[in-house]
Amino acid sequence: MSYLLLSVLLLPVLSIPFVYLAGRKSAKSAALLLSLVALVTLALVLTTVPTILNSPSNRYVETYPWIPVLNSNFTLFVDGIGLSMVIITMVLMIAAALYSINYMAGKKNLPVYYTLLSLLFVGLIGVFISSNLLFFYFCWELMLVPAFFLVGGWGYKESYKASFKFFVFTHAGAVFVLLGIGAIYMLTGSIDLFTAEKLLLTQNPDIVRWILIALTGGFAVKMAIFPVHMWLPDTYAEAPAPMSALISGVLTSAGAYAIIRVSMETVFPAVAATSFGIDFLHGLAVFGVISAFFGSFVALAQNDIKRIIAYSSISHMGYILFGVSLFPLQTAMTGTVLHIVTHGLSKGLFFLTAGAIMSVFAIRDIRKMGGLAGKMPITGTASAIAALSLGGAPPFACFISEFFIFMGAFQMIPIDSFYIVPTALMLIATVLSLAYSLRFVSKVFLGPSNIKEIGEGEKKKFEVPRFMQLAMIILVILVVLIGIYPSFFINLINTATATFL
Amino acid sequence: MVGIFDVAFPIVSLIAFSLLTIPVLRGIRKTGYKTALTLVWFAIAFSVAFAAVANLALQYYALPSPQPFLSISLSDSSLSWLSSVFMIDGISVYMAIMFTTVCAVVMIYSLFYVDPSKRPSERYYAIMLMLTAAVIGAVFSGDLLTLFIFWEAAAAGSSFLMLYKKNRSSLNATLKYIVMIVIASAFIVFGLSLVYGITGTLNFWAVKEALTVLADKTLLILAFIFIAAGYAIEAAIVPFHFWLPDAYGAAPSSTAAFLSAVIDQGSYYVLIRVLIFILVPTAVLDWTLMLAVMAAFTMIVGNLFALIQKNVKILIGYICVADVGYNLVAITSLTSDGLRANLYFFLIGGITTALAFMAVGIINHYGFKTLKDFSGIGRKMPLASLALLMAALSFAGMPPFGGFIAKYMVFTSAIEANLAWLAVIGVLMSVVQVAYLFRLVNYMYGKKPKDEVRIKEPIKLLIPVFILAGTIIILGLFPQIVLNLIEPVIRQLPFIP
């Protein structure tokens, strides 16, 4: 047995004190160390790709004993879905750390900032590679505490208020998840994802459905689906840009991942045959459509640069939930997981560009901007690519994944005619998302400038410092690359979605 | 063979040390090395006590065929069921170990908190040792009268610890506390007299046997109500909880830590011991629903009142009340998982409240009392705030702190016992708990302090605080350390088939 996944988890844990000590010397070295750790773990975890693609189970698993009394082994695994999530976590963490070098320069307590960032990193990796539900929850909550302090401590004016809202909302969701996990343990005597999946099949579906509701409701809070989205706009608006990128790119993705992994893959099969199972999927579709519409409409009406992106996040989580509601279809599921990846990267990029603009001009109202394309060429290009990707324009990443989701939806319509209306509405929602994306690009980057620093005939460039550019360029490359050549992720994810049901 | 000597030794040695403390500390005060010598003195006292308890535990577990309940009578005659009896079982051994350990840590804190060079401090320490002895005596009691005597000594005796500051509010709170304890004792004595009248004995085993065959249960119900009410007052179960936050809030922080970690958990231990194991197993009287309702109310009231508190110390007092509610949830399930959860929650709850009181005590010392005063304290006193933050996270059930595993076990045991509604209430109240705890954290880290002056924190006081903080992290990451200790208890439960 090799200790590959354990070292993927432990390497960031062990690096935490070093990150702190490096931060005491200079904040830059802490950020570089953190991104180096992320890079090494990325390289380590990528070595599992052949196993995932070729082994019969399509999984890479490691098991260690943990709490024998509670019948709980410490099992780590990656499959196509988990690996995709780990990859975007690492990439966004590298980007966020590099970006922070310039963005956070001059702020207070930077060693603590990078320490908390490493802690958040550990929690995120743990969520994506744990197959033990207790440890999954453990990491789920572990990422909440550093996120609270990162948003509160280094954000804009009302940041602690926002992060308090964020914490209470997501924790409220999390305790329902805990309840669901406890119920799974009580029914099956196991808290391993895959063992529980088999054992739940023999349980009474009337009880299992409450577990499904508790878990999905809890995860939906983290995803910020329509009625429980209230924490999201404030948090994104007040958080420092690297944290906005991480929360939107990875933390909400963790919610989506958990719905697919725990709610759908583990619990849902037990109720799939009942009428409740069908109703549940329809319910997910309805909430998905509402979120997509709500997010897009509000995003169209916003003038705050970060709030536009925040509401666009709600809208895209709606797409993902709609994709999840097509559960058994492989095309749709592959598209959904791919959308989590592409949305994470594009949204992360979008927030980084917004942060770049705000760090240079200290304004956040898009009506007061304009004409920045010539003044900030790299930021402008990156921002336009992110916006177009989120708007679903080819050849950028989100186009591919949305295309797959709609392919799945069209396959579903002949099977279940309920999906005609939601699919039609979702198609309209994509038009709306293109609308707010283009509005954003035209108001911020095109036309005459309304910024007072930029006078008539001003030749000076306002580009952000190197590391911020580097962070954005990394994400731009990935967004374009996945848009042109998505096969790597599609093959990877297909191996995992093929085993559903 | 475990003899009377083995059981009595930890209790007697602690009492002896307690009596010697006053002259010894007075002697120490005359020498130059006050703190060091005082520390040595208590190190000796607690190592002797700990060795005695460990000896008892080893002997008990070394028995060729471990009996569920080992009874040790003072007299060997045929009338032994009338005499005073000690009982040893897995739970009492576990509780004794925990109490001794926690008392030792709290004692270190008190040594620095209550200035040992001042006059009446030696009495404070002496009483603390005496109370430890009484609690350990209560844990090993084998008949209702011995239990009553030891337990009331501990409960009433702790009023002296509260009174140490001798100011108006502490006098007030102590008076309230004493009145409640006296009422509780009266209830218990009346209930016990009824039990004695029904069964003709107070010995645990004899009482249980007599009650199981009892035909007419009217008197028993009456006795049960009185005894349950009495112990409920002492354990601060809603609606008898109102004395606790006041008393803990007015007491010195070292006292509050001691009370929450030892007396509060001890009173709860006595409650379950009497109600569940001995006096009224469900075969005799079905009280599960009543206790479940009380658990729900205790959680709701404790958490909702904490939500509106402005004084941080009183807020933590209400968390103690809420913790009792979570404990009740676990035990109401009446399963091995429930008991395991309960014994684990005892320990974690006790340690966490003690940690919180200790950290708040350090901060209070500089005049910061209300939530508003706590604004920006995270920057002024980073270490004490870190400890309080850890306690808050553990209360909130966040990993990797012990509170997380404890709450998880409590809720699963409730679900297992088909009390899912209770688990849902518990979970909702947990959300409320997060709300007020994070409001506190928000004040500590999010608000601007009045001035940016960094306060020099007392390192000596922080050592015991961080011992406890480290303990809850270790127990959160490796709960099997304690769960393995609890495991033998589970197998000897009388109500598990």
Image (cartoon, coloured by chain):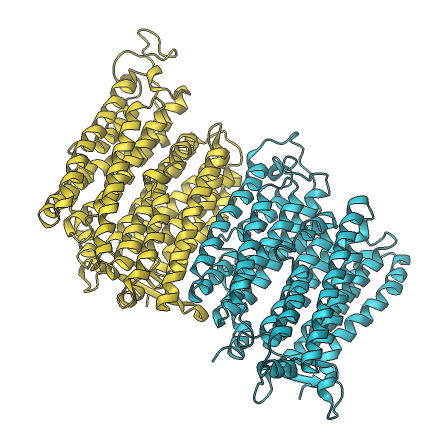
Image position of B307 (left or right of A138): right
**Where does residue B225 sit, x and y in percent of width and height?**
64, 66
**Where does residue A87 sit, x and y in percent of width and height?**
29, 47
Q: Residue at x 41, y 56 (%)?
A: A179
Which quadrant: the N terminus of chain B?
bottom right
Q: Nearer the viewer, residue A347 or A6?
A: A347
Image position of A402 (left or right of A230): left
Observer able to see residue A10? no
Q: Nearer the viewer, residue A289 or A113?
A: A289
Residue most toward the bottom? Answer: B78
Q: Residue at x 25, y 43 (%)?
A: A320
Residue most toward the left? Answer: A414
**Numbered disc total:** 0
Q: Nearer the viewer, residue A81 or B483?
A: B483
**Where does residue B171 sit, x and y in percent of width and height?**
80, 49
Q: Nearer the viewer, residue A122 or B138?
A: B138
Q: Quadrant of residue B146?
A: bottom right
Q: Quadrant of residue A427?
A: top left
Observer able to see residue B229? yes
Q: Is residue A194 above or below residue B455?
A: below
Q: Residue at x 53, y 74 (%)?
A: B282
Q: Is residue B481 above or below residue B430?
A: below
Q: Looking at the colours in the rendered structure, which chain would you say is drawn in cyan?
A: B
Q: Which colour denotes chain A? A: yellow
Image position of A436 (left or right of B5): left
**Where does residue A122 sit, x and y in percent of width and height?**
41, 50
